[in-house]
Amino acid sequence: MKDIKYREVWDLDTLFPGGSESDQLHKHIEELVGKVNEFKSKAACFQTPQDVDDSIKVAELIEYISVIRTHLSEANSFITCLLAQNPKDQRAASLQGKAGSISSSFESVVHKTQKILINIEKDLWEALLDTDELRNYKFILNEWREKGRLQLPENEENLVSDLMVDGYHAWGQFYNALVSDIKVYVPINGKVNELSVGQAINLRSHSNEEVRKESHKALEDVWTQKEELFAKILNHVAGFRLQVYKNKGIENVLKEPLLDNHMKEETLNAMWRAVDKYKQPFINYLNKKAEMLGETKLNSYNFWAPITESKQQMNYKEAVDFVTEHIGRFGPEIEQFTTQAFEKGWIESENRPNKSAVAFCAGFPLTGESRVFMTYGGTIKDVLTLAHELGHAFHNHAMKSVEGLNKQYPLSIAETASTFSEMLMLDAAIEKARSNEERLFLLDEKLKRSVMNFMNIHSRFLFEKNFYQERKEGNISSSRLNELMREAINEGYKGSIATIPIHSWIWTPHYYITKSPFYNFPYTFGYLFSLSIYAKAKEEGKEFEPEYLALLRDSGSMTVEDLVMKHLGDDIRSEAFWEKGLKLCIKDAEEFIYLSEQCGEE
C-alpha cells in the first residue's frame, strides 16, 4: 500500500493562510460584499422576460447567484473550521457574523429575483427552459418558480423577513442559549457531578446502568422544572410559522419541507407505510436486549447501553489503513480520494481538549476540497465516524464537475454517501470480528441506527404532525405536549419501550429549527436510500462506482423520484422499494437474536 502520512491535525493554511487573521480571508469577504452589490444592481434592472432571447439575462443572474454562493460557502466553511478547532476564537466569531449579514442581504435579492419568474407566461417559460443557456438549470428554475408562488407580496415578504430576525429566528436562538446554559446534577459513584445537557445525555451509553438511570432521572427533573418555558418557545416558533403559512394560503405544513427535500408526499407516505409494516423484527430485537439486561421491557435509558464490551481498538494509523482498504473495495476513484484526504491533511482527528465535540465535514466548492473534523478516541465508533464524514467529503468530490446551482442537494440525499461508507465499515468490522460477543456488539451498533430511523424518528414525525394540527387551534400546554409525545413514542415503538421520555419534545433540538419544520423524515429516507445503493454496490463491486458517482452528481438537479428511477430503475412511491432496505436491516435483527442465544448457551 502507498505510504500514507498519518497526521492528526488538519491543514487549513492551503485554503486561507493565517487562520482568522488571514489577509486572504478578509480580502475574500470584502470581495464578496462587492459581488453582492454588483448582483443587487443587476437584479434591480431585471424585468419580467417577454421574449425567449431574455434567457441570456436570466442566465447572467444565475451565474451571479452561483458565483456568490460558491464564495460564501468557501468563507463559511473556513470560519466553521476555525471555530471548531478553537470555539473561543473571537475573530472567527466576528467574521461569522459578517458573513451571515452578507448572506442575508444576498438571499433577499435572490428571493426578489425568484418572485419575478412567477409572472412569466407559461408557454414562454417552457420555451426559456428549452434554450441552451437555461436547459441545464430546468429543475432548479422550476423549483424557484414553485417557491416564488409561496412568497407573499414584496412589501409583506420584506416585513416578515424583518420580523423573523428578532422574532421567529430569535426564539430558535433563545432555545439554543437556554439549553446550553442549563446545568444537570447527576450522582456518579457517590459524588454529584455538575454536567451540561449534552454531557448528561451522553451518559445514556455509560457501561453502568445506575449511572444511565440517574442521568435520565436528573434530566427529566430539569425538564419538568422548565417545561412551561420550553412550551412557550415551541408554541411561538410554530405559531409564527403557521401564521406565515396562513397568509400564503398554505394549509399543509409538509408542503415546505417536501419541496425543500425534492420529494412528493406520496413517496413519504409509502416510506412510512413500509416502515410501519416491518417493525416487528425490531421490536423482537428490543425485547431481546431487554431480556439480556434483565428487564421485561427495555427502559428507554438502556437503549444505548453497551450489550457487550468491544475488544476492537484501533490506533489512528490502523484506522486509516482499515478505512482506506475497505472503502477501496468499491472503486479506484473513492480509494484514491480517501488516500488523498489523509495525505493532504484534510482531517482533524487529534484527541485534545478545548475543541468542539461535534464531528462534521465542511465542503470548499471553490477549491474543490473538504475538511473533516472529529476527535479520534480509538474505538470502533470513532472509525465509523471517520468513515461517515469521509463519505460526505466524497459526495463533495463527486459534485466538483457539476455546474454551480446544481451542486446543492437536499437533506434527504445528504446522508447517502456518509451512510454508505459507514455501512462498509460496519460490515468489514463484523467480518473481522474474532468472537460472537464482538459480532453481537457490532450488530447492536447497526441495529441502534435502524431503530433510531424506523422507530425514534417515526415518533418524532408523528409528534410534530399532531402538534402542528392542534397548534392551529391555539397554544398547547406543556402537559398536553407531554401527552402528545407519549402517544407518538408509543406508536413509533409499538409499545416496546418503558420509562418513556415524555419530555423529548424539549431536548430534541430539531423541533426548534426555524429554517424548516419536520427536520426528521429526511434522515429515515436517507438511511433506507443508502441501504438500497449499498445492496447494489455489493452485487456489482467496483463496476458500480461510475453509477454511484453519476447518482451523486445528479442529486441536486432532479426530484428524488426521478433520481431513483434514472439510476436504480425503481419507483420510490411504491412500498416495495423501501422494503428492500428494511429487509437488510431485518436480517441484522434476526442475526442479533441468534447470536445472543448462542452466547447465552456458551
Image: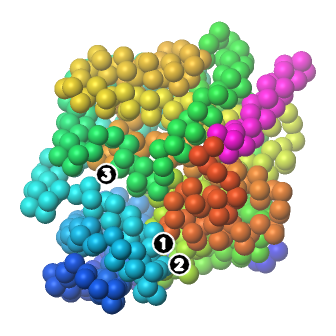
Query: As shown in the figure, which amino acid type bears the numbered disc 1?
Result: Lys
Label 1, label 3: how far apart the Cα atoms are: 20 Å
Q: Where is residue 428 in the image (x, y as percent from the top left)?
A: 79, 52
Q: Position of residue 414 (x, y in %)?
A: 52, 58
Q: Quadrant of residue 524?
A: top right
Disc 2, disc 1: CB below 8 Å? yes
Query: As shown in the figure, which amino acid type bears the numbered disc 3?
Result: Lys
Q: Give the range drawn in magenta.
A: 575-602
**Which comes sooner in the sequence, label 1 or label 3?**
1
Q: Where is residue 468 in the image (x, y as percent from the top left)?
A: 31, 32
What residue lies at 79% left-to-right and 35% top-to-bottom? 587
Farthest front residue in view = 123
Magenta stretch contains residue 600: yes
User: Does residue 483 appear in the picture of this structure?
Assistant: yes
Magenta stretch contains residue 300: no
What residue lies at 33% left-to-right and 40% top-to-bottom? 252
Front residue (pair 383, 271): 271
What residue lies at 45% left-to-right and 69% top-to-bottom? 139
How many neighbours does mark 3 have within 10 angstroms: few (below 14), some (14-19), or many (20 or more)?
Answer: few
The residue that mark 1 highlights is 407
Label 2, label 3: how far apart the Cα atoms are: 26 Å
What residue lies at 11% left-to-right and 56% top-to-bottom? 156
Residue 179 is left or right of residue 309, and the answer is left
Q: What element carries label 3?
A: loop
Disc on res. 489: none
The answer to whether residue 394 is above or below residue 224 is below
In which quadrant of the rendered image does the N terminus lie?
A: bottom right
Disc on res. 402: 2
Q: What element carries label 1?
A: helix
Front residue (pair 269, 184): 269
